[in-house]
Image (spheres, rainbow, N blue to C red):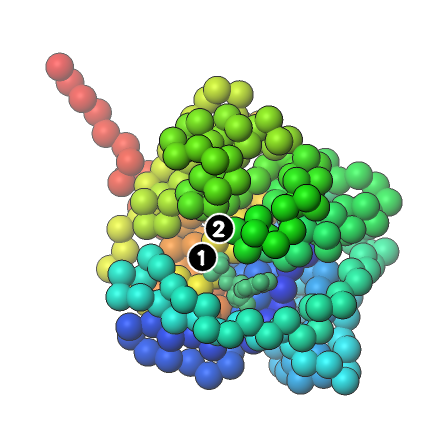
Amino acid sequence: MKLLVVGSVAFDAIETPFGKTDKILGGAATYITLASSVLGVESGIVSVVGGDFPQADLDMLSNRKINIEGIEIVKEGKTFFWSGKYHNDLNSRDTLVTEVNVLEHFDPKIPDSMQDAEVLLLGNLHPGVQLSVLEKMKNKPKLVILDTMNFWMDSAWGILMEMIAKTDVISINDEEARQLSGEYSLVKAAQKIHTLGPKYVIIKKGEHGALLFHEGKIFSIPALPLEVVFDPTGAGDTFAGGFGAHLAKTGDFSFENMKAAIIVGSAMASFTVEKFGTERLETVTNEDLKNRINDFKNLTSFEVAL
Ligand code: AMP
């Protein structure tokens, strides 16, 4: 199955306790599709960049068989720019700069070659843009996955609710789940979010793993304890990319297979945090991924003889 991805393709400047970058390649759609390319899934991006966006980065994406026909280039415009600084615990960060630039008047266009995508992954963007992509698909996708953030809850609540109502799987962090539902307990939060539309609710807990909720069932996984955590930027997007790509690859949207997809997403995200930006993700092989999934298995399997 094909995976259509909507989201930012961006420049990021990142500061962590371990170092600092100038403008480097970033953006939600970039991380998502790089992750899906490790699984060999046919994916395509719908996004927009400015005339300042390097051809070398576009080539890097298309060399990985990522369809970039849906990336509009506004020659006279500037690419979306985000800058953030992480605190010492790496769990929280301050956004220093957000320059929306060409994303401000983005009118997404889906290339014909991606109109038949069965899985639609709506990366973090204005919910109005996410909704318009869903509406522009001539064939309704079989699965709609939504990533969003507290920023849109504060600034675009009504249209976000409309978008969530049309979503099958929502992926948010614990703080966002609490804000969206008004509940502190994550179990109660997930129950409330189900009533807004999504049959599947994923709640990410950073270095504490993730939870999947569906029809009263809960699946929980830890995050891999890593020796090196260098830069968490894009971890959530990489997670969503690994998750969505596994579902597109297998074509199986059952709860059991979503459990597997969550493991794939987490394993993939564990690579992203090891280096700045997309640097590590760009070199991950299928073999690396298999080994890391095995690490997950070893970490979580045990027997108890009483
Ligand atoms: P994450 O660390 O998973 O939250 O994702 C970080 C990526 O999101 C960065 O590469 C940014 O370029 C991108 N990003 C940050 N803020 C926004 C925004 N308001 N809209 C779209 N993309 C954003």
Report the residue at 67% width, 62% height from top: 66
* Towards the viewer: 147 or 63: 147
Q: Is residue 61 above or below residue 207?
A: below
Q: Residues within 10 Å of mark 1 (few under 14, many from 20)?
A: many
Report the residue at 26% width, 66% height from top: 88
Q: Amino acid at mark 1?
A: Ala
Residue 142 located left or right of residue 80: right
Rendering quadrant holding ligand 1: bottom right
Residue with the mark numbered 2: 239
Residue with the mark numbered 1: 235
Disc 1 + disc 2, Cβ < 8 Å: yes
Ligand 1 is within 8 Å of the C-beta of the residue at disc 2: yes
Task: Using the image, tell me which numbered label, if any, was put on residue 303.
Answer: none
Quarter in which the C terminus is drawn: top left
Residue 119 coordinates in the image, percent (x, y)? 69, 43
Q: Is residue 13 above or below residue 188?
A: below
Query: Can residue 280 be seen by looking at this rendering?
Result: no
Quarter in which the N terminus is drawn: top right
Report the residue at 28% width, 32% height from top: 301
Query: Can residue 166 be seen by looking at this rendering?
Result: yes
Residue 277 located left or right of residue 52: left
Residue 203 coordinates in the image, percent (x, y)? 45, 40
Residue 7 located left or right of residue 279: right
Q: Amino acid at mark 2?
A: Phe
User: How far is mark 1 from mark 2, CA to CA?
Assistant: 6 Å
Residue 61 coordinates in the image, percent (x, y)? 63, 69
Residue ranking furthest to the left? 306
Ligand 1 is within 8 Å of the C-beta of the residue at disc 1: yes
Q: Which secondary structure lies at badge 1?
A: helix
